[in-house]
Amino acid sequence: MKIGLLQCDHVQEQFVHQHGNYPQMFSNWLQQAKMDFSFITYEAIKEQLPTDPNEADAYLISGSRHGVNDGHPWIAQLENVVREFHDLGKKIIGICFGHQLIAKALGGKVLRSPNGWGIGMSVNQVLRPKPWMTPQQEQFHLLVSHQDQVIELPFGAEVIAGSAFCPFYMLQVKHNLLTVQGHPEFTKAYSKALIEQRQQFLGKEKAEMGLNSLKLNADDRILAQWTVNFLLS
């Protein structure tokens, strides 16, 4: 399977050597599901986008330090691609920023959360199990790094998983769109580095809470398998 990675940011230069850039992170993550795949990377942040939906079998929209409401032209262009490809039934996976962008592109609403930053390890309840969610789990843990959240669902979206902190954490739209607020491609080491770098504006209490949450294990392998199952379903 060829996956088109719509890359919406770059890992900061000081972290690349140890943690890799996003294409490497996503490749490492999905390899856990032992699927035969290859990536074709589009730097969406530089307005590099597929012109033909059949350039890849499926697409994955990455996270970003930018917000979907920032008003950059490349964001509007990416929203147009999402709407076009969705109408054609193309499968698209949205991660963090990608989750929010898909929701906004299809009529949902994204705003800065009054709950503040989500950092470290999130704990999420499965609310609507799907056949592709094997092996089955009632809850799962994923690393997060976000201020914004989807607060109004796009038309046709089902809430697959959520928490009190982030009610619309995982969404499915029809048979072809799957989005998640978390970062299954992150490692705990990378999450720790981000929290430590941002400690000054996160505040000591929030940063310590995020660092302490890293004692939990991430279910990134489970999410890799679910994602592959979804893409092949």
Image: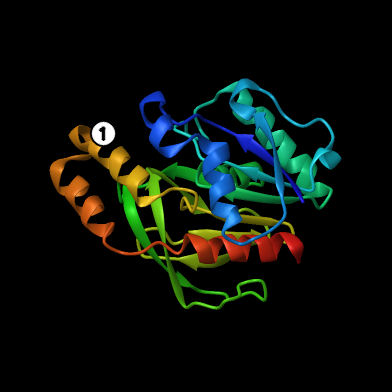
Picture coordinates of residue 79, whole percent (x, y): 67, 36
Q: Is 166 situated above or below 185?
A: below
Picture coordinates of residue 205, whole percent (x, y): 14, 48
Q: Is 157 situated above or below 147?
A: below
- Is residue 128 toward the left or the right of residue 121 in the image? right
* Quadrant of image for the C terminus: bottom right
Picture coordinates of residue 86, whole percent (x, y): 76, 48
Picture coordinates of residue 180, whole percent (x, y): 53, 55
In the rendered image, which quarter is residue 200 located in? top left
- Is residue 33 toward the left or the right of residue 182 in the image? right
Return the residue at label 1: 197
Q: Is 149 situated above or below 225?
A: above
Q: What's the residue at 21%, 46% (across, down)?
A: 207
Q: 34 and 115: which one is in front?
A: 34
Q: What's the residue at 82%, 40% (across, down)?
A: 53
Q: What's the residue at 56%, 32% (across, down)?
A: 8
Query: Is label 1 in a helix, a strand or a loop?
Result: helix
- Is residue 86 toward the left or the right of residue 67 in the image? right
Q: Amino acid at mark 1?
A: Gln
Q: Confirm whether residue 105 shows in the render.
A: yes
